[in-house]
């Protein structure tokens, strides 16, 4: 191979991140014919009425650039849904920005708000794009660790002292994901109050990734938006998307809700990242949000039952299983099987047992914190989960 063919062309700010673990594990699952409980995407289709709305929009010629910050019908649908949920009304044209998935919204928020050298507080394990986007923006990530309790039923929690120490005079923003991928944790009101108090006192902006907002399973753990806490409306950028709520993860329609001033910063980056989001899909997204309540409620019932099924299977085999209060992921401790760290466990599970899972150590600043864990996705048909259960039974003993 010539030198040019073997050299890496990846810019230094991205070289450390390699290929995402989701791509890597899905390719490995395909290679071994494994049941893919790694990358989080449904193996069933989204609602027919939403697909019909997309087809109708294409047939009607809705195919030129959309308004930079979203088509009026979708901005309105998002604003209406926001006020139904929070009781606060917002202006669809100055406070809602439609993006190409929440991943783009995260990039736009960080690139639009973070100056070089600014610090951003992240809870780890974190969704991998957060850290990469902080670095692309020239920011510096500071970490607060969600630690699994000794008693697995108690789930994951952070040390308030570590959170306080993560804030410094250089802190520009905190990025919160609740319901939380990959732990399945839904942050409680007292936890959110602690976070809000620090943001207000230290003058930090909060960016919240709430893509699993509708996928919560416990009455006692409802999803609460950080932006609805006292003093937070003027400093919070709330992000969400269509994909998880409507089982349409490939459609890539997301949004940011924030004050006009914060929205202006998000748009400053969004207009140069994608300019606008796919027009016909925005029409379909508006239909989903306006008429999708029945679908969402049925989906939550299905996922609650899938969660209970897969948790039971994993526990029965000998995993220590952490509670999933929201999202469609289960975190489990695999140490009882003596198959090495999370990376080797997940590789062997995929190749030898035929079930793929995500090794979470890549989501930590210190990978050692994730070595005992594996993340399983349950956003799959029951027959898929049953096939995984049959194969996982081979792990026992
Ligand atoms: N959010 C999904 C997950 O956590 C998939 C993300 C991706 O493939 N980039 O599995």
Image (tube, rainbow, N blue to C red):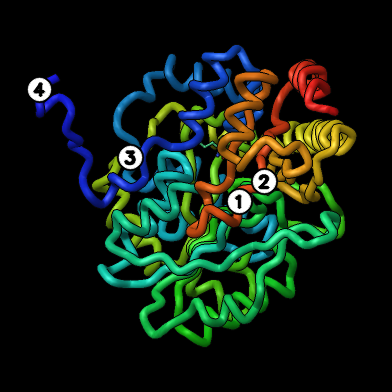
Determine which of the numbered discs, if any, sits on residue 373 in the image: 2
State how far apart marks 1 and 2 are (Cα). Answer: 5 Å
Q: CB under 8 Å between callouts 1 and 2?
A: yes
The crowd level at tag 3 (other Cα within 10 Å; few <14, some 14-19, many 20+) is many
Question: Which residue is the site of mark 1?
Answer: 370
State how far apart marks 1 and 3 are (Cα). Answer: 37 Å
Question: Which residue is the site of mark 3?
Answer: 276
Q: CB under 8 Å between callouts 4 and 1?
A: no
Q: Can residue 247 be seen in this view?
A: no
Name the secondary structure under disc 2.
strand
The crowd level at tag 4 (other Cα within 10 Å; few <14, some 14-19, many 20+) is few
- 89 or 147: nearer the viewer: 147
**Quarter of the image where one finds residue 119:** bottom left
Which residue: 16% across, 33% down? 7
Which label lies toward us, 3 or 2? 2
**x and y percentages locating residue 196 in the rendered image:** 59, 77
- 214 or 380: nearer the viewer: 380
Which residue: 53% across, 59% down? 238
Q: In this view, does 243 lie to the left or right of 204?
A: right
Name the secondary structure under disc 4.
loop
**x and y percentages locating residue 116 in the rendered image:** 25, 68
State how far apart marks 2 and 4 are (Cα). Answer: 41 Å
Question: Which is nearer the N-term, disc 1 or disc 3?
Answer: 3
Does the beta carbon at disc 3 come under 8 Å from ligand 1? no
**x and y percentages locating residue 372 in the rendered image:** 67, 47
Name the secondary structure under disc 1.
helix
Question: Which residue is the site of mark 4?
Answer: 2
In which quadrant will I find the N terminus? Answer: top left
């Amino acid at each position: 191979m010539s030198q040019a063919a073997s050299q890496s062309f990846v810019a230094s700010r991205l070289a450390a991140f390699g290929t995402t673990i989701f791509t890597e594990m899905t390719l490995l699952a395909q290679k071994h014919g494994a049941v893919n409980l790694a990358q989080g995407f449904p193996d069933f289709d989204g609602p027919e009425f939403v697909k019909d709305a997309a087809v109708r929009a294409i047939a009607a010629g809705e195919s030129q650039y959309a308004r930079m910050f979203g088509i009026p019908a979708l901005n309105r649908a998002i604003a209406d849904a926001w006020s139904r949920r929070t009781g606060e009304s917002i202006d669809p044209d100055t406070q809602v920005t439609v993006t190409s998935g929440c991943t783009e919204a995260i990039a736009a928020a960080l690139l639009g708000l973070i100056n070089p050298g600014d610090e951003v507080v992240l809870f780890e394990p974190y969704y991998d794009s957060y850290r990469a986007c902080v670095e692309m923006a020239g920011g510096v990530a500071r970490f607060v660790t969600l630690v699994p309790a000794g008693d697995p039923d108690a789930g994951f929690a952070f040390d308030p002292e570590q959170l306080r120490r993560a804030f410094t005079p250089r802190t520009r923003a905190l990025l919160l994901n609740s319901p939380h991928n990959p732990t399945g944790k839904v942050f409680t009101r007292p936890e959110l109050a602690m976070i809000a108090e620090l943001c207000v006192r230290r003058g930090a902006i909060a960016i919240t990734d709430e893509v699993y907002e509708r996928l919560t399973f416990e009455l006692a753990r409802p999803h609460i938006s950080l932006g609805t806490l006292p003093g937070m409306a003027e400093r919070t950028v709330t992000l969400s998307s269509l994909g998880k709520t409507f089982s349409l993860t490939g459609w890539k329609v997301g949004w940011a809700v924030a004050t006009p001033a914060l929205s202006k910063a998000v748009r400053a980056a969004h207009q140069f990242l994608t300019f606008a989001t796919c027009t016909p899909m925005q029409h379909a997204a508006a239909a989903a949000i306006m008429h999708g309540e029945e679908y969402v409620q049925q989906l939550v019932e299905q996922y609650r039952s899938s969660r209970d099924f897969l948790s039971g299977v994993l526990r029965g085999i000998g995993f220590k299983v952490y509670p999933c209060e929201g999202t469609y992921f289960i975190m489990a401790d695999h140490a009882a099987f003596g198959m090495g760290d999370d990376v080797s466990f997940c590789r062997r599970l995929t190749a030898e047992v035929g079930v793929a899972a995500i090794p979470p150590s890549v989501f930590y600043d210190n990978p050692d914190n994730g070595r005992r864990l594996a993340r399983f996705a349950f956003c799959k048909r029951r027959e898929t989960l049953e096939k995984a259960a049959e194969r996982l039974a081979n792990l026992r003993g």
